[in-house]
Image (cartoon, grey):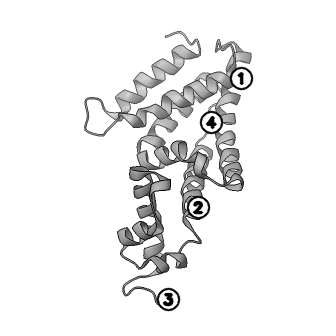
Amino acid sequence: MARTQGSHSGITGPRVRAAALSLFAQHGYAAVSMRQIAREVGVQAGALYNYTPDKQSLLFDLMKTHMDELLATRASLETPTSPVAALETFTRLHLRFHSERPDEVFIAYMELRNLSPDNFSEVEALRRAYEDQLEAILRAGVESGDFTVADPKITTMAVIAMLTGVNTWFREGGRLSLSEVEQIYWDMVRQAVGIAA
């Protein structure tokens, strides 16, 4: 099928991903068709297959890209040797990174069930790699006597859930700035791991 006039792979490919991201976040993966994505992009439905093999590949690409970018951003930061400073760095990065990507976060958590088994395994491994970084910080803090944590694995899941929940309500221009929200959340994380104020 001929490419729609004005369609260029370097432009249309990212537009396909952006349209899929927006539509999946608004309506849910199962409710969105390739035809809807094509209409949003402004190409014929058949033309989408020049940019992606299928809808499942689009979902996987969005979720994997999100995790790859999160892990790369973490890797680009210098991790402090002090467990307390490392935990603060993790907390603030998680809040900043995710507050800028509400649609990606929604899809990353709500659409896992729609991944094929192989795709699920790959995304889950990336999530685990990220969670393991926080768990390692918590374990180091327990060993050093900085943290009082009964179960580092459960605390890891609880802290990540608390931090990620900011996306459900935080909006730029609201009552609190992102830096103020970061400080409040850091205070809550400190309390959760038994760090004295």
Residue denoted by label 3: 1
Vertical side of 164 occupied by 115: above or below = below
Query: Please, what is the three-letter code of the amino acid marked with disc 1?
Result: Arg
Say what secondary structure mark 3 lies in.
Answer: loop
> 171 or 110: which is nearer to us?
110
Residue denoted by label 4: 79
Relative horizontal placement of residue 97, taking residue 90 as reference (left or right): left
Q: Residue 181: image x %, image y %?
A: 38, 28
Say what secondary structure mark 1 lies in.
Answer: helix
- The disc, 3 or 1, on the residue closer to the chain's N-terminal end is 3
- The disc, 2 or 3, on the residue closer to the chain's N-terminal end is 3
Residue denoted by label 2: 56
Q: Disc 3 to disc 1, how far (Cα)? A: 56 Å
Looking at the image, is mark 3 or mark 4 nearer the viewer? Answer: 3
Q: Disc 2 to disc 1, how far (Cα)? A: 37 Å
Q: Disc 2 to disc 3, how far (Cα)? A: 22 Å
Residue 90, quarter of picture: top right
- The disc, 2 or 4, on the residue closer to the chain's N-terminal end is 2
Looking at the image, is mark 1 or mark 4 nearer the viewer? Answer: 1
Residue denoted by label 1: 139
